[in-house]
Amino acid sequence: MRVPYRWLTEFVAVPIEEEFVRELAERLTLAGLEVASVERVGKPEGVVVGKILTVSPHPNADKLKICEVSLGRETVRLVSGAPNLVENTLVPVIRAGGRLPNGQIIELHGRGRLRQDPIEGRLPNGQIIEAAVFRGEKSEGMICSRAELGLEEKSPGVWILEPELGCQVGDDFAQHLEFDDFILVLETKSNRPDALSVLGVARDISALYDLDLRKPDTTIRESTEKIESLASVEIEDAQGCPRYACRVFSDLRWGPSPLLIQHRLVKGGLRPISNIVDATNYVLLELGHPTHAFDYERLEGHKIIVRRARPLKDHDAGRGRARAERIRFGDCRRAQARRRRRGYGGADSEVSEKTQRVLLESAYFDPISIRRTSKRLGLRTEASHRFERDMDPEILITALDRVGALLQQWGSCSVARGVIDVYPKKFAPRFCELRQGRIGKILGIEIPPQQSEKILRRLEFSVERLGPDRWRVGIPSFRREVEREIDFIEEIGRIYGYDKIPAQRPALPLVAGRRERVEELKDRIRRILTGLGVSEAVNFGFIAKEDLEVFGGGDDLVRVRNPMSDEFYALRPTLWPGLVRNLQHNAYQQVDGVKLFEIGKVFRREGRTVRERLAAGVIVAGRALVPLQGREQFYDFYDIKGIAEALLGELGFKNFSFEPSAEKILHPTRQAFLKAKDDVLGVLGELHPEIARHYDLPWRVYLFEVNLEEIYQRLQTLTIPNWSEMQQKVTPKYPASRRDLSLLVAEEVPEVQVRRILESERRVERVFLYDLYRGSQIPQGMKSLTYEITFRDWTKTLSDEEVNEIVTRLEARLKDELGVQIRKT
């Protein structure tokens, strides 16, 4: 934002001195309003108001003309190539020996140092005009354009001064403008919509220097004609437009605004258009709130309806362009996508040279809707920039009155009595308690209570003392971003000056940091899986729309409301889609065998909240590396099962089992739950063949996913003081004993039930199923299971009698509980 310094002096009494401007730029930056640079607008020398007496062709050049120009006490002869030279018009003239305004930029560098450099291009360069001869004709000066005086970047011709501006022949032209000024170029990166105005910056200056803040004059003279008889307003979309107000101005005459106003608009970054439009733009910069003028006679039914709009036309500097958008505004059937091209609204009701009566609106729009519409249209304007930052909903009437006061100051203007103000649901005043002790604790310095209170009052917060060290603070309507006690402390700190807070060592004792145990678990899993030859993959936490259609999402899927693309359609409910995409990429690159894992978060919706959990997933497919065997082998179900067993075994799990599962995205008969007692740790299996074909995968694909949060909770019960100790293995002092056990088990009895009985014995170290047989030698409806059981006692060597006793006890339990028959070999 560009803030003319002399404009600021209307609201706060600050000196117009370069040294003070340098200091002010530093203090504003330290207070949170970053001043990127300071531009100096120099004063021209020798520029006077002249009157063109005659315009005649140049005898030796078709594109040049010779003008006789009266400067009051003298008449000069000037040569110009401007196309808009007209006799008996007033123009600014710089005589020979005069100087154009000198523009300089003062940039902010490093620790608040200011560097002054002349710049070229946008600011005038202070050129001295000398008498010159053009094709044999002498010119004793130059007729100036707006660009040459620094009032715009490029001009089509010389500056014709309208009679309404009140300039007299021979006047020092600089007295009609505001040269010898500074422009503060602010970068408002923070959420400070109040700082997007001259008044808002002046408010911060008043707090920084403890100065009184003067407000703009909003005094208007109303006529006897009541506004209710002239116009009406209806809000159909109260959510998009919570408040809408308007006034009606009559007896207007289209013309230029005063030169001082035009100059301020130019220095503020806007282009002067006419008195009506300039008044609204002036208030936009001064108060920070956009207003808009409609030609009253062109408003259908003289009625404003605020609603979602339909396709419309919009203009900018004479360029028509059709736009269709859901901006929330309209007059009966017309929609005004008016936010805004420098004061122009919809083509149906824009003001023009014929306008004599206007309806001036001031509204508060939903910032989210404005932001979304502005982004969709690619239309960034001064008005939308402010609206989308949540403007002050209580400044609407002040903005209307300020425009009316300006128009009445500049000429005749009749204001209808009253204001139409549709405000269905008023914003409630907001208050919060502030504690003096909390200020010192947060800022690290004790600020006197009187000073804290004064700072808040200067910033226009209302302050009510509740006790010696407590206040009830009212939040002004223009500070919508302030919500909590900590926000008040920030305001006090930035105005007091963070640079005044002494640096000191923290009072808290330093304690050596320690990694979260969950992070240690993740690192442990990485080491285990990479040790098994599995490579890590890292994917986004989203699932593409195409993958969602294949894998399915369910009712608990967490969709993204406004995804950047279909690749980020929803938060991923599982790690498998990303791993399958990784596998697909490797297959396209003709990689023979792939073993990948990923550790990351997955998401599910639980009621109105989103539940996220940590998971680890593995995928294997393709040709397995089997050295020295001279044969081709592909990964199968037992490879993924072996990886899962190795992972859980290395993590310290002893008793876990595989039980039937029914995941739709897995092969119906080649999948299983991974369980510890009755808790599901994860699931593994073969990817459904139809899904594999969808991704053009040439192999059978095997994968598993485990819930790391469930694993973490179970590991908490293990008596291991540090995760790093899980890497250590103690060499047993006493030998193990092994026995083979062959069993006849009914087909309907799951193997896991047999395993649980075998592993329930304390001195059973390992149970390994190495044979499963069904055949003619086995009774129908039965299956043969052969186990190798390892026995060990960590306190002594087990004798054969003790091992045989354990085996006998296990056989008895198997017979009694499962009806198992013992096969004697």
Image (spheres, rainbow, N blue to C red):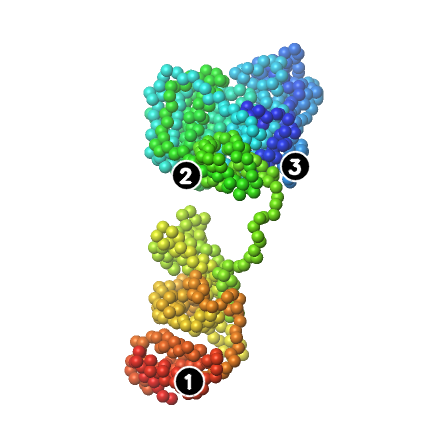
Q: What residue type is labelled 1?
A: Val
Q: Residue 369 carries which label?
A: 2
Alpha carbon of mark 1 to alpha carbon of mark 3: how far? 86 Å
Q: Residues within 10 Å of mark 1 (few under 14, many from 20)?
A: some
Disc 2 + disc 1, Cβ < 8 Å: no
Q: Nearer the viewer, mark 2 or mark 1?
A: 1
Q: What kind of element bears circle 2?
A: helix
Instruction: State which tag comes first along the sequence, 2 or 1.
Output: 2
Q: How crowded is mark 2: few (under 14 residues within 10 Å), some or many (20 or more)?
A: some
Q: What kind of element bears circle 3?
A: strand
Extreme-front residue of the structure:
468
Q: Which amino acid does label 3 sit on?
A: Arg
Q: In which quarter of the image is the N terminus?
A: top right
Q: Position of residue 82 (x, y in %)?
A: 60, 23
Q: Is residue 606 above or below residue 477?
A: below
Residue occupied by mark 1: 803
**Residue 324 versus residue 672: which sits nearer the camera?**
672
The residue at the point 47 percent across, 26 percent down is 280
Q: Which of marks 3 and 2 is in front?
A: 3
Extreme-bottom residue of the structure:
825
Q: What residue type is labelled 2?
A: Ser
Q: Residue 503 carries which label?
A: none
The residue at the point 42 percent across, 26 percent down is 397
Instruction: State which tag comes first along the sequence, 1 or 3.
Output: 3
Instruction: State which tag comes first along the sequence, 3 or 2.
Output: 3
Q: Position of residue 625 (x, y in %)?
A: 51, 73
The answer to whether any part of residue 306 appears in the image is no
Residue occupied by mark 3: 113
Disc 3 + disc 2, Cβ < 8 Å: no
Q: What kind of element bears circle 1?
A: helix
